[in-house]
Amino acid sequence: MKSLNSDNCALCSSQKYPIIWANNLLRIVLINDQNYRGYCRVDLINHVKEMADLDEETRNEFMGVIFKTEKIIKEYLQPDKINLASLGNITPHLHWHIIPRYLSDNHFPDSIWSEKKRNAINKFSKVQELEFIKYVNNKLNP
């Protein structure tokens, strides 16, 4: 399932963000953006470019973890909205962004990649980050 173009892929190399959960197929990293507390990314571990390139079982497991992670974030952080995004234009390796959105965040109601509207900071403390990671793990590994 690995593509020939994985040598220079940022998601195939070591991760700069903490891996908060993983199995043999997927990993969840905590992006920990100062304005989007709980912002996670779900990565397919193998280098695959498009959802259509996955077999049905892998695709269903991938989407299941995305939806479970979204639900966990919703329960734990109670954001005003959650955005799910899979673009891959810059990094053509399957990954989904799960972004908790708050009315006071820097870009709301626009995309987080749009022009900044305000200068809010809504980051986890180290203790909050560890509690969130533990909560996610407990929910995904009952």
Image (tube, helix red, strand yellow):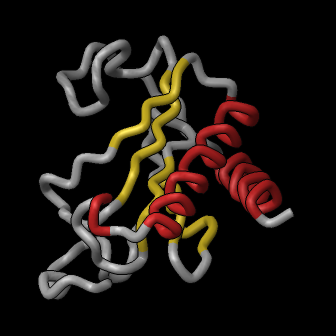
At x 79%, y 66%, the residue is 141
Horizontally, residue 80 falls left or right of residue 90, namely right
Position of 84 relative to 135 (above/below): above
Q: Quadrant of the C terminus?
A: bottom right
Position of 14 relative to 94 (above/below): below
The percent position of residue 117, horizontal first and vertical second, equals 27, 14
Horizontally, residue 25 falls left or right of residue 78, namely left
At x 24%, y 21%, the residue is 116
The answer to whether residue 17 shows anywhere in this view is no
Q: Quadrant of the N terminus?
A: bottom left
Horizontally, residue 140 falls left or right of residue 110, namely right
Q: Quadrant of residue 52?
A: bottom left
At x 55%, y 38%, the residue is 37
At x 74%, y 32%, the residue is 75
The percent position of residue 135, horizontal first and vertical second, equals 78, 52
The percent position of residue 90, horizontal first and vertical second, equals 13, 56
Horizontally, residue 138 falls left or right of residue 106, namely right
Q: Quadrant of residue 7?
A: bottom left
